[in-house]
Amino acid sequence: MLPPDAGIGYLFVLPLVVLVLLLIAYPLGSAVYLSLTEKYVGYPPRFVGLKNYVELTGDPVFRKVIWNSAVFTVGSVTVKLMIGLLMALSLHQALFARRLVRGLLLLPWVVPTVITALAWHWMFDALRGFINVSLETLGLIGEPIAWLGQPSTAMMAVVVVNIWRGFPFFGVSLLAGLQAIPADLYEAAAVDGASATQRFRHVTLPGLRPVIFVTTLISTIFTLNDFNIVYVMTRGGPGIATHILATYTYEVGFQALRWGRAVAVSMYLMPLVVVMIVVLARRLTRED
Amino acid sequence: MTGRRLGLGALAVLLLLVAGAATPAEAQKPRLRVWLLRTYVPDANKALEASIAEWGRQKNVETSIEYFTFDDIETKYVAAIETDSLPDVGQLQTISPSRYHGMGRLMDVSDVVADVERTNGPLLDSALAATRFGGRFYAVPFNYITDVLFVRTDVFKKAGVPYPKTWEEVREAARRIKAKGVMDYPLGQSWNRSADGYGVFQALLYSYGGGWADARGHYKSIMNDTWRAVVRWASEIYTKDKTVPPDAMAWTGFGNNEAYLGGKIAMTFNGPSIYYVLEKENRPLLGDTLMLVKPAGPAGRNHDVFLLSWGVFNGTKHAELARDLVRFVMSPDEARKYMYQSWGQMVPAFEKLRRDPYWQKNPSYKAVLEAPSHAHTPGYPGPLTPAAAEVVATNVLTDLCARVIVEGWDVERALQEADKRINDIYATVPSR
């Protein structure tokens, strides 16, 4: 038996339901459907079931793209977390010109990604770039290093740029987390004779765990979907050495004109992302 | 108070009358949406804008111009096709007429081409190949943006090396310049994911007599000695000669321009944009720069092509106006105005315009003019098809080189992968 005011309750929820259906469910449903079709730009879609996914799974180029995406994401997020933690711990201490330093450390996050990527592209240039010229001037290298011209260093370069751009997000989030840890916990630990390392391990880290979890998850999702840095710096090259899911989706969709397959590329890791989002949502709800 | 109300009321009535009088006339004025390529020559862009505006004034048509860049030509059209928001008329790149005609999006403009040929002379073969399908034209050729070989005359002189006329001589020249210690990395050639990569690869391939389609446009295996020789040329300049800057494989479309303008290389294949910068800014390097027609191979001088053309899209409510606009901008006077503002960048496809004395200014301009007469569309020796277009657009050709240069694959394995990709494309691309 519904309570007497249930109707009005549903009425209030209705706009939200409509919005969710229109803005999330419909586009997502369309994308899933498209990924199950042979849809070529300018032609009507033809339902082919899981054919796109099966073909992608057997495609060595796509498998390389998945591997690249994993390296790019895991490499970037791990280092961003570490640098962000260092940034937060430093800023949390009484520091000369703390506000200025905080502002400066946020700069990478504020600068448009395309500008960041172009600037780093120039710095990594083999013949005229800041890095090689500096290393040569210091006598550390005899001939130029092709940072963007070799698979391993090219991947490292795009990861570095992603880290540079993304670590302030971790820093700011973790700083907020640090400030929420009650000071008396540290005082109690100090009274008990805990060293700085022990205080960090048994007070700071447990206090930061929820923030670390949430920021890492959000950053993983964003990094997995990153497009600009790789597109501007290498276009996925040399060859396909830095091709990641976003750039490959673009190539298949807008250059090969195979939209069904392109959507399948972007949907391929959707189950993983959904799991991450569900976990994140649960964690956030629990924190609330 | 009443007087004020009356005053406001009268003002409102007056505004309504003015609006009422103005609206029907404005509504009657047709509006034409035009999409243009923003080339790297602002003077030429402005000349074309002025030409379109002049036509709009003469015909009492409101024209709305939107630009795309080299990088987002396909992206913009693809999005418009899927959302049914194509313009009335727009500029197309080489592979677009074949693709969009296949989708049934382009109107037959054979009558417009016939009119333009009457005043501007016949078309070059490569322009026909890119715009005519089944004997009918689906785009009106506008201009070529040709690829040429840039050479640093001072470097060649210092090394005592003659200018190359064949692909083998290009390689040999680079080796000798390096060996004499004049320049470490004389050859700026990237097999990257841009036209500087897949365009030059086509020129090399076609000049050696290779192709991935037969004369009828059907898939043809690439597992043969011609392809092996071509891939060896493309990869050994990196792996054996080491005459190419070490990070050239990661250059984006502007990488070789920067390297040449920065004095780091002595040779590169590029559109004439480098010369435009040198000439417009009167840089010292201009005197040491020469543009040459791209080299020949065992099968002759057969090159790639970048052709801009005009397409009128099905679905336009103003088909006749769109055709009329194209006729106007292609009329001899307007076409010449544009050409003279192009700094030698925009090469006409029609014979009478090609005979204009403008192109006799110096040997570099002459080379730019000559280049399209050796050009062929993707899929040569067959016709330009959506499948041939996709082979180029998806970087199959340059990925093939990258597999060998960057990932250390042997030529045979790289060719097998490319062959499979090409075969898959031809087997699955839709066509009407």
Image (cartoon, grey):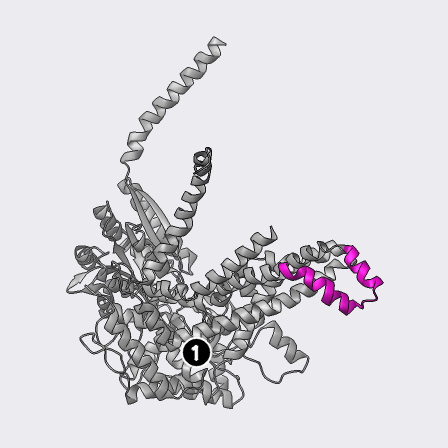
Q: Which residue is more in the foreground, B127 or A60? A: A60
Badge 1, how many Cα within 10 Å: few under 14, some, many 20+?
Answer: many
Residue bearing the label numbered 1: B189
Residue B320 coordinates in the image, percent (x, y):
21, 47
Magenta segment includes B200: no
- Residue at horizontal 46%, vertical 60%? A274
Work out whether B164 lies above or below B375. Answer: below
Q: Is residue B382 left or right of residue A72?
A: left
Q: Is residue A242 left or right of residue B28?
A: right
Instruction: Residue B64: give x, y in percent of width and height.
Output: 35, 46
Instruction: Give me the residue at 29% from left, 84% from top.
Output: B208
Q: Is residue B337 above or below residue A167?
A: above
Q: Which residues are magenta?
A: A183-210
Task: Give residue A89's quadrant in the image.
Answer: bottom right
Q: Is A196 contained in the magenta span?
A: yes
Q: Main secondary structure of the magenta part?
A: helix
Residue B162 visible in the current orientation:
no
Determine the image quadrant of residue A85.
Answer: bottom right
User: Which residue is found at the position 73% from the left and 59% from the top?
Assistant: A91
Q: Is residue A142 left or right of residue B13?
A: right
Residue furthest toward the top?
B2
Give amino acid for label 1. Answer: Gln
B252 relative position to B82: left or right: right
Between B274 and B385, the one nearer to me in the picture: B385
